[in-house]
Image: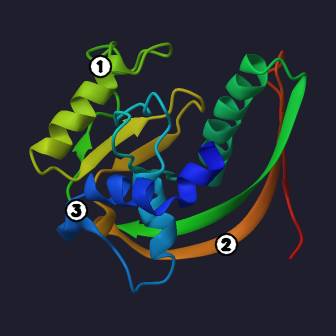
Amino acid sequence: MELAGWTNDRLVAERVARLPRSEWVFGRPNSSVVMAAFLHVAAGGMRFNGPDLGAWYASAHLTTAVTEVAHHLRREAYATRFADLIRTYRAYTADLAGAYLDIRGQQASRPEVYAPDSYAAGQALGEDIRSAGGDGLLFDSLRHAGGVNVVAHRPRNALNILQTNHYEIRVEAGSTRIHATRLAA
């Protein structure tokens, strides 16, 4: 049923309607990838977006991106009681236009936003920024020390999207070890 919902014209129309038409991107390379990030939302939302509308999340460095993806893959392995999970992911590069609220280095002053076990405060902050017309946030990675992430709340600000490599990421539910392999073309 979930798979059918991703391609059901009525449900796709409902998802697209959540995003103002002025925010839609089309006619550019990889615009469908950008739109998917906003329209196919995790049931509970993510750190800086609620469950109704997604956002474009990215990391400044590949190691941070792999660590972030592996964390969520490990959570899935644990929740589904699999000893390990292996998935293949595409890597993209992008330029981001706009002005982003910079909350790097503010873990002590914004502990609720950086809470490792709750997205409630982060979602409220992110959705407040989105509803006020803001572009998004720069924030510290909780999964990779020294890593920097960004969340863009405006699809139109994700520019020059290029697919780079494919990676196989393997995690174990009971370990912090990450196995990431760049796949040959």
Query: Which residue type does callout 3 highlight?
Result: Gly
In this orientation, does residue 97 appear? no
Q: Earlier in the sequence, mark 2 or mark 3?
A: 3
Secondary structure at numbered mark 2:
strand
Counting other residues with Cα less than 10 Å from the Cα at mark 3, is it few (<14), some (14-19), or many (20 or more)?
A: few
Locate the C terminus and report the quarter of the image it occupies. bottom right
Q: Earlier in the sequence, mark 2 or mark 1?
A: 1
Q: Report the residue marked by disc 3.
A: 98
Q: Considering only vertical position in the picture, is 148 above or below 164?
A: above
Q: Earlier in the sequence, mark 1 or mark 3?
A: 3
Q: Residue at x 71, y 34 (%)?
A: 73
In this orientation, does residue 21 appear? yes
Say which quarter of the image contains residue 105: top left
Q: Report the residue marked by disc 1.
A: 121
Q: Residue at x 41, y 58 (%)?
A: 10
In contact (CB < 8 Å): disc 1 and disc 3: no
In this rendering, position of residue 29 left or right of residue 156: right
Q: Residue at x 34, y 53 (%)?
A: 14
Say which quarter of the image contains residue 7: bottom right
Name the image colouring.
rainbow
* Percent coordinates x, y for residue 97 in the rendering: 28, 67
Q: Report the residue marked by disc 2.
A: 164
Counting other residues with Cα less than 10 Å from the Cα at mark 1, is it few (<14), some (14-19), or many (20 or more)?
A: some
Tag in front: 2 or 1: 1
Locate the N terminus and report the quarter of the image it occupies. top right
